Amino acid sequence: KAGVTQTPRYLIKTRGQQVTLSCSPISGHRSVSWYQQTPGQGLQFLFEYFSETQRNKGNFPGRFSGRQFSNSRSEMNVSTLELGDSALYLCASGASGPYNEQFFGPGTRLTVL
Amino acid sequence: GDSVTQMEGPVTLSEEAFLTINCTYTATGYPSLFWYVQYPGEGLQLLLKATKADDKGSNKGFEATYRKETTSFHLEKGSVQVSDSAVYFCALRSNQFYFGTGTSLTVIP
């Protein structure tokens, strides 16, 4: 089974621009979560989608948004980029159910200049 | 709300030393507990999990026991190797996943 894939792997943007990151979950997984990882803040939860509906949301400003498509692929968008948005963005997919683990992709490294 | 607290790093050990990384949690209900490992430049990989009290998760020589009475899920390994150098994350799943801040482990030959 193919793992979670994320594109692009690396991205460089300038302040004020917007960016869209993509995540393809493991086949059959309907849950997709997004995390921001930085050296200072660690791993922070952004949001979770399940069957095209946002199920949970972390404490991030409205500049961060996401969506999930009917094939479970997900995109995350960040508008009006700030220097502090530089981070590794991780996507994770999982099967439904309270005991199931999440499987992580390799991440997208975003650098904002 | 639910949360995970894990021991601050970094941790440096000599090869074949005993490893313990402490993890405690706060949660309502009965969460599932996990340990993930992250190698440099990669995403997180599941190391082991436990879904109910007294369950022991184990993998690659690592073990952790779900202790409800002490709300803990400490990670242990009897003899670490250089290849175990990585960042380790404790996590719980209730309504969503909650991760600890990560503990960096370096094993020196």
Image: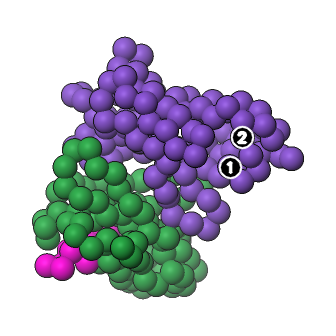
Please provide percent x and percent y for residue A99: 26, 44
Q: Amino acid at mark 2?
A: Val
Q: Chain of mark 2?
A: B
The answer to whether A104 is drawn above or below residue A98 in the figure is below
Residue B15 falls left or right of residue A107: right
Residue A31, image x, y percentages: 23, 62
* Residue at the right extreme, as displayed: B109
Q: Residue at x 76, y 50 (%)?
A: B82
Q: Position of residue B84 (x, y in %)?
A: 68, 49
Provide residue B67's location: percent of width, then percent of height. 40, 21
Residue A93, picture quadrant: bottom left
Chain B palette colour: purple
**Residue B101 to residue B2: above or below:** below
Both on one chain, marks 2 and 1? yes
Residue drawn at x 48%, y 75% as measured from the top left = A108
Q: Helix, strand or loop at disc 1?
A: helix
Q: Residues within 10 Å of mark 2 (few under 14, many from 20)?
A: many
Instruction: Name the residue beneath numbered marker 1.
Output: B84
Q: Is residue A30 magenta?
A: no
Colour-to-chain, green: A
Give the magenta range.
Answer: A62-73
Figure check: A107 above or below B55: below
C-alpha span from label 2 to label 1: 6 Å
User: Of A26 and A80, which appears nearest the observer?
Assistant: A26
A110 lies left or right of B97: right
**Residue type marked 1:** Asp
Q: B87 left or right of A66?
A: right
- Determine which of the numbered discs, if any, sits on residue B80 in the image: 2
Instruction: Please tell me whether mark 2 sits on a helix, a strand or a loop.
Output: loop
